[in-house]
Amino acid sequence: MTTAKILIIEDETELAQVLQDYLTHHQFECRRIDDGAEALAAFEAFMPDLVILDLMLPHKDGLTLCREIRQRHDTPIIMTTARVEEIDRLLGLELGADDYICKPYSPREVVARVKAVLRRSSGAASANGTATTSALSLNPDNLDARINGIPLELTVVEFRLLETMAKEPRRIFTRDQLMDRIYTDQRIVSDRTIDSHITKLRKKIASAGNGIDLIRSVYGAGYKYEETETPPPDSAAGLQGDR
């Protein structure tokens, strides 16, 4: 297996060194850059498999870099920040960040997140045609969706919603991002239309899957697909969308 390459864009030298040490210990090849203005050139020269990107950088901030990288590449990006304001999280999601880690954090947590994001990225890249997880099976050729072998009988819109999220488990999709994926004709609809479709989709999944809940609301951000061993106790209340 080829060693995954990680680019750490972080201006706190000691923190960046600790991250590099931990990731190198776990068999990742790492490079560090501490200046936002030099980061894109470093990215193009290194061509990493994943980027750990700090929000606050000298000369060019992390959100701008995230936008620039995402315009050219689909490389997974994990953003790190000590700023937890909702607007920063939403902007990062809109620009295509794959995950967030809030400072202060444990280097072990970062290693675990890196491995998880790389697994999701690898699974999405290899999914050509049928998307399958332990509980869910999707076949876009005939719009067939099943939970543990039981048909869901989805509409075209519901199928597209489920397929979009299932191909990138745990990634948070905003309503706008989901609308762009399911309405390819660029029609104008209310963002609450997504909530209605999600509610119906959850009910069908719960009915066919004996209460299983695969779609989670993320307060103030959107929705994500995530499988768990057992349905959460408040899954029925969660069918109402964001609270």
Image: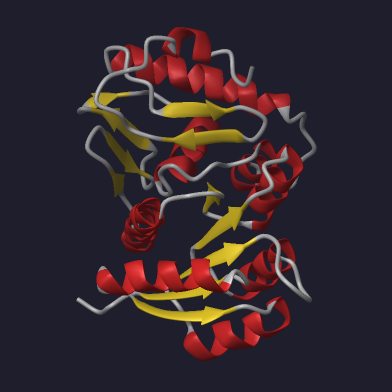
Report which quarter residue 21 is drawn in.
Answer: bottom left
Tell how many labels: 0
Report which quarter residue 63 is drawn in.
Answer: bottom right
Q: Quadrant of the N terminus?
A: bottom left
Q: Nearer the viewer, residue 222 or 156?
A: 222
Residue most extreme to the bottom:
45
- Identify which residue is drawn at 65% across, 42% down: 183
- Residue 155 in view (yes/no): no
Q: Nearer the viewer, residue 37 or 103?
A: 103
Q: Nearer the viewer, residue 163 or 120?
A: 120
16, above or below 182, in the image: below
47, above or below 233, in the image: below
Residue most extreme to the front:
14
Q: Quadrant of the C terminus?
A: top right
Q: Nearer the viewer, residue 116 or 95?
A: 116
- Identify which residue is drawn at 32% across, 32% down: 227
**Percent from the top left, x then y, of residue 31?**
46, 82
**Percent from the top left, x then y, of residue 77?**
53, 62
- Identify which residue is drawn at 67% across, 85% down: 38
- Identify which residue is drawn at 75% across, 73% down: 58
